[in-house]
Image: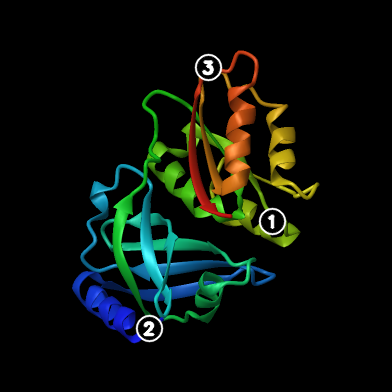
Amino acid sequence: MNLIKRKALVIFEKQFGKTGHVLDVRAWNPSTFYEIDLHLPGVDMSKWQSVQHMKCKVADGVYRDYTPAHWDEDTQTCTLYVDAAHDGSGSKWAASLKPKDEILYLGISSTFTKPVSSTSLTCLGDSSAIGHFLALEQLAGKGNVSGAVVIKEEEHRKAFMSYFDSTLEAIPQKVSSNINNLQEWLQEQNLDGRAVYLAGNVPMVVELRKIIKALPGFNGRVKVQGFWW
């Protein structure tokens, strides 16, 4: 990054940047997935009616969007769930965090993902979508959400099922393509009248949307949130 851009970014961060504090960090075994508990002073979480995203500074001049989930509006705390299986700035940032660390973020904004009134929800995605779906489940209520998340590591699947009071299923990566894994799971489901939420790898969710829309008799809604390529 050249000197002019660096100076401009510093000014931008001073004007719009906000800070939060790390309360705790828990790495799953193997350590390619992290839970990061945050305190976000001044954030009014009572207004959250849809899934949110916060743009976190993970390196000099580098920002990544993460989903605050399991939030408590009284204590202004939440948890980020970070899939760190891919080598990159976000993964290195998550692995480096410790309790009492300060984080910088450029605000918290709404996504287009929110519960559909009087409609049951089906969520399909990969490990990067865990926080997104847990946030949606918090908004919609556990009984209104079902679905599957492909999680490669067996220990991670066990952790997901034991840690979270969720109706989402953690399914193994039987074949290399998560599209095929989720398509296989779909064959056993009835999607009539349901709203389907897809999140995770961009090519995966785009292809799954085509597959679901082409299902005979499908008359529900499909909502897509892509996170990475």
Between marks 2 and 1 in the image, the one whose residue lies nearer the viewer: 2
Q: Identify the residue shown where x is 48% and y is 79%.
A: 97
Q: Identify the residue shown where x is 22% and y is 78%.
A: 11
Q: Which mark is residue 204?
A: none
Q: Are marks 1 and 3 in contact (CB under 8 Å)?
A: no
N-terminal label among 2 and 1: 2
- The quadrant of the image that shows the C terminus is bottom right
Q: Which residue is disc 1 drawn over?
A: 158
Mark 1 vs mark 3, CA separation in Å = 34 Å
Is 109 displayed left or right of 200 in the figure?
A: left
Q: Which residue is disc 3 drawn over?
A: 219
Q: Is residue 126 above or below residue 80?
A: above
Mark 2 vs mark 1, CA separation in Å = 46 Å
Task: Give the residue furthest to the bottom.
Answer: 3
What's the residue type where badge 1 is placed?
Lys
**x, y percentage for residue 9?**
29, 76
Q: Is residue 208 above or below residue 151?
A: above
Secondary structure at numbered mark 2: loop
Q: Are marks 2 and 3 in contact (CB under 8 Å)?
A: no
Residue 204 appears anywhere in the view: yes
